[in-house]
């Protein structure tokens, strides 16, 4: 309530041409308008559009505000009006257009296809998980943890030759599993 | 796309002092005074209908004229109230009682005079003068209303246009009853109310466009 009284005073000063009061009013009011718009729009761009429409309307009809009356209902009436207009416009354009969201965009650069890369990494991890235990340990130590053959031999107790064979077989079967996936 | 802080800065830069609107009822009175002036000018130039004194003794005529005048006054007040953002939209109902009485008197007139309507008696010659009178009162009143309510383009154009047109139509119909000589035939009464309906319908259909046109032309 105290806030509304402040707004009323700011607006009365703004009508007299006080720019500082007007700036303070608009900056104060913007988050409030955003919360009203957020009840009706989900897209942040639409919310900001609605806020700006309301601010423009407030500016255009600021002479209709009577400081003897509360500021809140005046502002909310304008905001509701603009939100309804926005929803109508949205309804019209929805009937004919499909908005291009970020999820729909795709580019040649690998960063743009991060989701695919992530799912491939998961597929590889699953495939490694399903290898026989010897091959799985060999792949983990030598390829994923990047140990040398000697270190891996020391940790696992397998011979260097056995590790080499296990790694070779693991890579072969992984290639088979993942390659099959890709072909289907 | 401009960001909201930038928009606020540009609005602040354009914040010239504005003159506050006078209370809506005072503005409605202003418009009604203008309408009264129009009617007075018509009275000077047009002469009253010769049988006015006689007609004024008939209660149904007096009630009809009073009701159309009341409709005009109430609809004008309603339009100016509706054009302010925080006033209730229920003000649109303000002229309804008077409108109801007005329509009833027209309906009553039709009923009474139904028998007197004969095929050969359609007053075609009358209609040119009748139409001129309608244009003469209706156009300046509509223009004044449009200019006074132009910022309603940004708020509730259809609502304001409907009640504004009703005000113009009712005042015009009042003028017609006072100045235009007619034997209260059904045709003339239908003419009278038909024009009112037409004006209100036009206001409802094109009000939004008219208001925004005047609002932009005024800038």
Image (cartoon, rainbow, N blue to C red):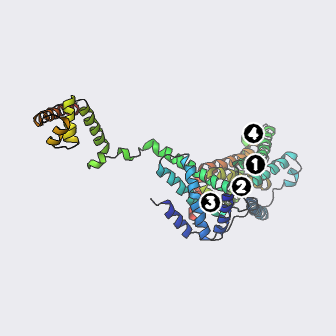
Q: Are marks 3 and 2 on the same chain?
A: yes
Residue furthest left in the image: A161
Q: Quadrant of the N terminus of chain B?
A: bottom left
B158 horizontally vs B189: left or right:
left
**Does residue A133 appear to the left or right of B148 in the view shown?**
left
Q: Mark 2, residues whose alpha carbon is within 10 Å: few (<14), some, or many (≥20)?
A: many
Q: In front here: A147 or A62? A: A147
For marks 1 and 2, give the CA distance.
Answer: 10 Å
Q: Position of residue B147 (x, y in %)?
A: 64, 62
Element carrying mark 3: helix
- Could you give the CA–CA distance between mark 3 and mark 4, rounded to whole angstroms? 49 Å
Circle 4 packing at 10 Å, graded few (<14), some (14-19), many (20+), is: few
* Residue beneath disc 4: B118
The residue that disc 3 covers is: B151
Chain at tag 1: B
Residue B43: quarter of image: bottom right
Number of the label disc, if any, that sits on residue B94: 1
- Left or right: where does residue B184 sit relative to residue A102? right
Given residues B6 and A59, the one toward you in this image is B6
Instruction: First in sequence, mark 3 or 1: give its number.
Output: 1
Q: Chain of mark 2?
A: B
Residue A96 located left or right of residue A7: left
Q: Please report whichever mark, 2 or 4, sits nearer to the chain's N-terminal start.
A: 2
Share a chain, discs 2 and 4? yes
């Amino acid at each position: 309530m105290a806030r509304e009284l402040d707004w009323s005073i700011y607006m009365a000063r703004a009508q007299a041409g006080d720019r500082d009061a007007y700036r303070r009013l608009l900056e104060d009011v913007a988050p409030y308008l955003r919360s009203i718009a957020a009840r009706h729009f989900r897209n942040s761009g639409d919310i900001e559009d609605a806020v700006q429409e309301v601010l423009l309307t407030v500016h255009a009809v600021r002479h209709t505000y009577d400081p003897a009356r509360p500021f809140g209902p005046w502002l909310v009436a304008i905001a509701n009006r603009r939100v309804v207009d926005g929803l109508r416009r949205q309804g019209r354009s929805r009937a004919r257009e499909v908005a291009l969201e970020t999820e729909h965009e795709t580019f040649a650069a690998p960063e743009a296809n991060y989701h695919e890369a992530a799912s491939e990494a998961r597929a590889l991890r699953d495939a490694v998980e399903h290898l026989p235990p010897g091959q799985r340990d060999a792949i983990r130590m030598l390829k994923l943890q990047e140990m040398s053959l000697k270190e891996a031999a020391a940790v696992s107790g397998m011979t260097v030759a056995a590790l080499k064979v296990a790694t070779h077989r693991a890579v072969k079967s992984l290639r088979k599993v993942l390659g099959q996936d890709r072909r289907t | 796309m401009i960001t909201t802080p930038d928009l606020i800065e540009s609005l602040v830069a354009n914040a010239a002092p504005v003159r506050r609107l006078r209370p809506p009822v005072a503005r409605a009175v202003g418009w009604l005074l203008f309408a009264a002036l129009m009617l007075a000018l018509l009275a000077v130039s047009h002469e009253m209908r010769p049988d006015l004194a006689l007609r004024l003794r008939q209660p149904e005529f007096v009630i009809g004229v009073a009701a159309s005048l009341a409709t005009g006054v109430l609809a004008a007040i309603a339009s100016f109230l509706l054009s302010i953002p925080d006033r209730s939209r229920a003000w649109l109902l303000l002229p309804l009682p008077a409108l109801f009485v007005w329509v009833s008197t027209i309906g009553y007139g039709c009923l009474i005079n139904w028998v007197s309507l004969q095929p050969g008696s359609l007053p075609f010659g009358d209609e040119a003068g009748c139409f001129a009178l309608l244009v003469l009162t209706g156009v300046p009143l509509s223009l004044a209303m449009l200019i006074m309510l132009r910022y309603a383009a940004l708020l509730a154009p259809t609502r304001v246009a409907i009640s504004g047109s009703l005000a113009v139509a009712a005042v015009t119909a009042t003028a017609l009853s006072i100045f235009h000589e007619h034997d209260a035939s059904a045709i003339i009464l239908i003419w009278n109310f038909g024009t009112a309906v037409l004006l209100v319908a036009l206001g409802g259909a094109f009000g939004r466009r008219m208001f925004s046109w005047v609002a932009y032309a005024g800038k």
